[in-house]
Image (cartoon, rainbow, N blue to C red):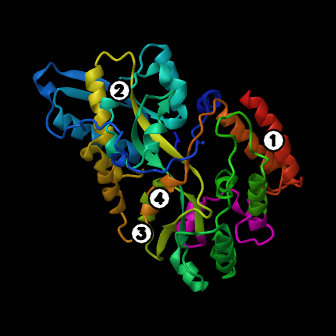
Amino acid sequence: MLKRSLLAGLVIVFAAAIGLAGCGQSNSGNNSASNPESTPSQPASSAPAESNKQEKVKITYSTWGSAEEKATEEAVIAEFEKLNPNIDVELILVDGSYEEKLQVMIAGNTTPDVVSIGGAHVGNFSGAFQPFAADEVAADKYLTDILLTGLQSDGEQFALPKRVNTKVIAYNKDLLAKANVEAPGDSFSIEQFQEKAIAVAALGGEGKDKIWGSDPLWFGQWLFQFGGQRVSDDYSESLINSSESKAAVQFIIDAANKYHYAPNPTEAQGQNMIDWFLSGQVGFKGDFGPFYLPLMKQITKFDWDIAPQPGHGGEMEIVGIAVSKTTKHAEAAKQFASFVSSSSEAQKIIGGGAALPVTKEGKEVFLNQFPDKNLNEFFAAMEYSKPQPRLKKGRQMGSLINKALADRTLIGATGQEDPSVVLDELKVEIDELLK
């Protein structure tokens, strides 16, 4: 809960203990409606529930997010309460340290009735949630099976899909045209990216008018572009020193130093690269999630679009919605969770926001935010992206990797060590953390 996750220092301490959303192989991504063995369930009704003849109940619902995400949550709640007048939903919006505060609430027996939870944390909190039975899961509603399996623990469904974040690459169409290079297609290779970025950077300029082929390349993303990953799928060993990982590090170093189509650490220090892209100075903006879309409405001076990440790789954050094992209003809580996850009303509201919805109805609304842009690429990324890993020491591992690369190699401003040696040593340290 999970970069995006978000736009969220107690959190650092706790996230180190439970792992930060922030990796298993995606399956084929086929809609389970095509699977004859899938068990369809009754979707959340858009008609007032039978409960409107019962005593009114109040449930609590915890989540996190920005001001815009809060507005989306409030709109979903308002729609649910309109359709279910005998159920009041109290929103508990946590500003930072979400998993830590959730742990405190669980320990104090004040767990919210309904809880937003990231797939990377489901295993850590599954003891506090009650699983959903097969007939409580509208499996045929979701865009891909991975949205459900990414929220399971030990084969049980402890949360229903709510929203997703995948990553693509955005590009300035006008800069590419000025550099006489074609826009990227569906099969966007790493070599094509570098060739195009070099050509855009050759447009030149000085100071604030300097044109960059790309924003700084981030190892946490490019590791996947080269086909690598931090740890094995069974979490038994680190893969940080694989040949793919070493190739990714060298590629990043060359982008800023050998070819200089991306700014080096000194040039990028203190700068917000999305602002550079919005100002028209950057050809390619990598690590681009749906959370950036509200900002794209500011662009009026150039044309833009999105494409798959070069090499087709990455992680995705699956955010689910779970029900407390100790809730006194299980029926109402599950009714709300089902509504958020699979109803057309809720998913259309989510689809109009800054995250990917999980149903076809929500997808249509999301695509219509920018009907002339290739927003479907966000959904295509679900097919090749890995769900964020469930690492108990994920934050510690991430900090260890980033610090070593920044301090000891040319990914940072002053490092001079051989990145291959640094990655070999990192493997030993991470293997210890995995024990």
Marks 2 & 3, CB-CB < 8 Å contact? no
Label number found at residue 373: 3
- Where residue 181 appears, x then y in whole percent? 60, 82
Q: Residue at x 84, y 44 (%)?
A: 424
Circle 1 SS class: helix
Q: How far apart in space, not on screen, are marks 2 and 3 (Cα)?
A: 39 Å
Marks 3 & 4, CB-CB < 8 Å contact? no
Q: How far apart in space, not on screen, are marks 4 and 2 (Cα)?
A: 29 Å
Of callouts 4 and 2, the N-terminal one: 2
Residue matched to label 1: 426
Vertical side of 42 occupied by 414: above or below:
below
In this rendering, the label closer to the viewer, 4 or 2: 2
Residue 397 within the segment the image draws in magenta: no
Q: How far apart in space, not on screen, are marks 3 and 4 (Cα)?
A: 14 Å
Circle 3 SS class: loop
Label number found at residue 380: 4
Callout 2 amino acid? Ala
Find the magenta span and give its range. 254-283
In this rendering, the label closer to the viewer, 3 or 4: 4
Circle 2 SS class: loop
Total marks placed? 4
In terms of depth relative to the viewer, which is nearer, 195 or 104? 195
